[in-house]
Image (tube, rainbow, N blue to C red):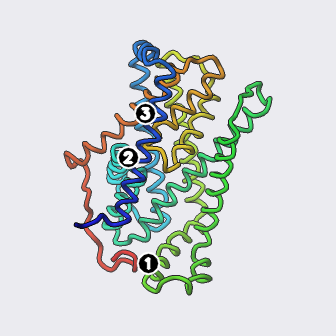
Amino acid sequence: MTSRPPRRTTNILLLALRFLVSGGLLTYLIWKADPASIWAAWQQADLRLLALAAFIQLLCIAISAVKWGVLLRAHNQQQPYRWLLGIYLVGQFTNNFLPTSVGGDAIRIVQLGRRIGSYAQSSASVFMERLTGFLALSLIANVALLITSTDLFGARLVNEPTLTLLAFGFSLVAVVAVAASFSAPWLLRRFHSYLPKAARKPLQSIAESLGIYAADRGAMLKAMGLSLLFHTLWISMHYVCGLALHIQAPLLIYTLMVPLTDILGLAPIFFNNLGARDLVFTLYLSQIGILSGTALALAFTAFSVRLTVSSLGGLVLLFGGVSMRGATREGGDGASA
C-alpha cells in the first residue's frame, strides 16, 4: 500500500483548513444576518453601477500590467503590453478560480522566464510588482486607521486591536522585505557560505536582479505611484458596488475596510478572502447603522465583480487571445535553466 508524500498530505490538510475556516465563518455570518435580507439588498441593485464597477476592476488589472512593464524595463526587458496584459489576466483567473493566491504569480514567472530566457529576472519583476503593491496597501491602511482611530475629520470608528496590529505588522514586514530586496546582493555575499552549493548560483542571479531596483529610483517611484493608483481604484470599485446597493456610507470607511480585508485575507487560513472580507465589512458597516445582511450583500457583490472580470483570463486561455508560450531565448542566466 502506497502512502501519500508528506508534502502532498500537508497541502491537502491546509486546503481543507482554508475551506473549513472560510466556509464556517461565512456560513455563520449569513445565518446571523438572515439570508432574506441579503437577497432583498441584491434585488435593489443598480446594474449600470455594477457595470461601472466591473470596468474599474478591469482598469485595475490594466494598471497592474503597466506597472509590471515598468519594472521589466529596469532590466532592459521590453515586452508588448498586450502580452503582459494577457498573462496578467491568466494569472488573475488562476488566483481566483484555483485554491491558491500565488498560482497566478507562478504562471507569470514561468511564462515570462521562458520568453526572456531568465527566470531570475522574471521572478524579481513579479516579486517587486507584488511588493510595491503591498507597500501601497499598508500605507493606505495605516493612514485610514490613524484617521478613524482619532477625532480627525470627525470620523472616529472602533477599530479592532487585532486588525490594527495586523496592519502595523504587515507594514513592518513589507518595509523589511523592500530593504532585504535592495540589499540582496550584499546579503548573499555575506551569507552565501551558509547556503547549499547547488542553490548559490540561482540565488545569485535573483539577488542581482533584485538589486537593480535599488539603483533605479525612477522605476521604483513609477511603480509606487501606479500601486497607489491601483489601490485607489480598487477601493473605488467597492464604493461603486456600495452605491449600486444604495448603501449610504462615506468613502473613508471603504478606504479602511478594503485594505484591512486584503491584509487579513493574506492569512493562509482563508480561501480567496472568503470570510475575511465579509467579517471586516460587517464589523465596520454596522458601526454606521448598515444591517449585516446589506454588508454581506456588498461583500458578495464585490467578490462577484472580481470573479467576473478575472474570468476573462479563462477566455484568453481558451481562445488563445495571447501567446502563452514565448520562444525561449538561448543563453539565459544561471537561474533560467
Residue 93 in which image quadrant:
top left
Q: Comparing marks 2 and 3, which lies closer to the viewer?
A: 3
Secondary structure of residue under mark 1: helix
Q: Are marks 1 and 3 in contact (CB under 8 Å)?
A: no
Query: Which numbered disc covers residue 303?
Result: 3
Q: Quadrant of the N terminus?
A: bottom left
Residue 92's disc is: 2
- 13 or 185, nearer to the observer: 13
Looking at the picture, does residue 70 appear above or below residue 150?
below
Q: Earlier in the sequence, mark 2 or mark 1?
A: 2
**Residue 111 x, y percent position in the rendering:** 32, 61
Q: Are marks 2 and 3 in contact (CB under 8 Å)?
A: no
> At 21% across and 49% down in the image, what residue appears?
320
Which disc number belongs to residue 202?
A: 1
Location of residue 10 in the rendering, given as x and y in whole percent from the top left corner: 40, 59
Q: Secondary structure under badge 2?
A: helix
What type is the residue that disc 2 sits on? Answer: Gln
- Which one is earlier in the sequence, the residue at label 1 or at label 3? 1
Question: Dot 1: within a 10 Å radius of its alpha carbon, few (fewer than 14), some, or many (20 or more) residues?
Answer: some
- Give the quadrant of residue 61: top left
Identify the residue at horizontal 52%, vertical 82% (top origin): 195
Amino acid type, callout 3:
Phe
Q: CA distance from mark 1 to mark 3?
A: 38 Å
Q: Quadrant of the C terminus?
A: bottom left
**Foreground of the two, 128 or 59:** 128
